[in-house]
Image (cartoon, grey):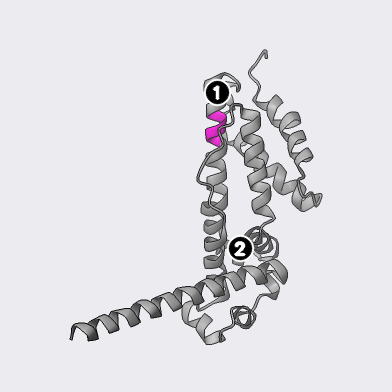
Amino acid sequence: MVASNWAAASAQTSSRRRGAVLERAILDAALEQLGTVGWNGLTMEGVAAGAQTGKAAVYRRWPSKEDLVADALRSGLPRFDTVPDLGSVREDLLALCRRARDAMYSRPGFALRSVIHECDSVQAERFHAVIFKGVVEPTLEMLREVINRGIERGEVRRDAANGYVFDAIPAMMMYRSKICASEWPDLELEEMIDQLMVPLLRPDGA
């Protein structure tokens, strides 16, 4: 009886493990399709082929393309767990910008941009919470911490801790990426920090 129970538990564990591996393969295939053929070109059949499984296995877990893509984005978006602390607001902002740039040009970043650029307003509504919680909110929190730390050190004017200032870097990076096709090499990041953010944040009279 003990041996039978152990065998059943072992079989269940093995089945769950196989299920988790398959689920990861499907989510990875969805990210790959978003980054190559985009939102409009992504199909459940194509994702199944990329994951080397049948489309029934995809539909069992995700009843729609929107559900699958939302989970794929959640699973693939980078985790920003630590805020840079390099001794100055300039260096901290540069480090954050490099992280954001690297995330934008990662596979999940290409996938995210295909959703933002290709979805119509009704479809995009489905992903607003995913994008806000996974990208916008963590980025703004880190910018807020860097700027508040700069205020405490006397590097940053006290009234700079506001939503317009926090939005400046993400807005500029999105604008130049989309309109000017900028890939944000290090030199452009440094110019943005030195010519926009440092003067914007500098204490009065400095």
- State which quarter of the image contains the C terminus: top right
Pointer 1 with pointer 2, Cβ within 8 A = no
Choose between 17 and 183: the one closer to the eye: 17
Q: Tell me: residue 114, above or below residue 52.
A: above
User: Which kind of residue does numbered mark 1 sit on?
Assistant: Ile
Query: Residue at point 59% right, 82% down?
Result: 52
- Which of discs 1 and 2 lies nearer the camera? The answer is 1
Q: Residues within 10 Å of mark 1 (few under 14, many from 20)?
A: many
- Is 135 on the left-hand or right-hand side of 172? left
Mark seen at residue 81: none
Q: Residues within 10 Å of mark 2 (few under 14, many from 20)?
A: some
At which x and y percent is residue 80? 54, 47
- State which quarter of the image contains the N terminus: bottom left
Q: Secondary structure at mark 2?
A: helix
- Is 134 on the left-hand or right-hand side of 186? left
At which x and y percent is residue 70? 54, 66
At which x and y percent is residue 41? 70, 75
Query: Residue at point 53% right, 52% down?
Result: 79
Choose between 71 and 48: the one closer to the eye: 48
**Residue 108 among magenta residues:** no
- Is 180 on the left-hand or right-hand side of 31? right
Q: Tell me: residue 60, above or below residue 162.
A: below
N-terminal-most mark, 1 or 2: 2
Question: In the rendered image, which residue does mark 1 sit on?
Answer: 151
Query: Residue at point 56% right, 22% down?
Result: 158
Question: In the rendered image, which residue does mark 2 sit on?
Answer: 124
Magenta range: 144-148
Q: Residue furthest left?
A: 1
What secondary structure characterizes most of the magenta part?
helix
User: Which kind of residue does numbered mark 2 sit on?
Assistant: Ala
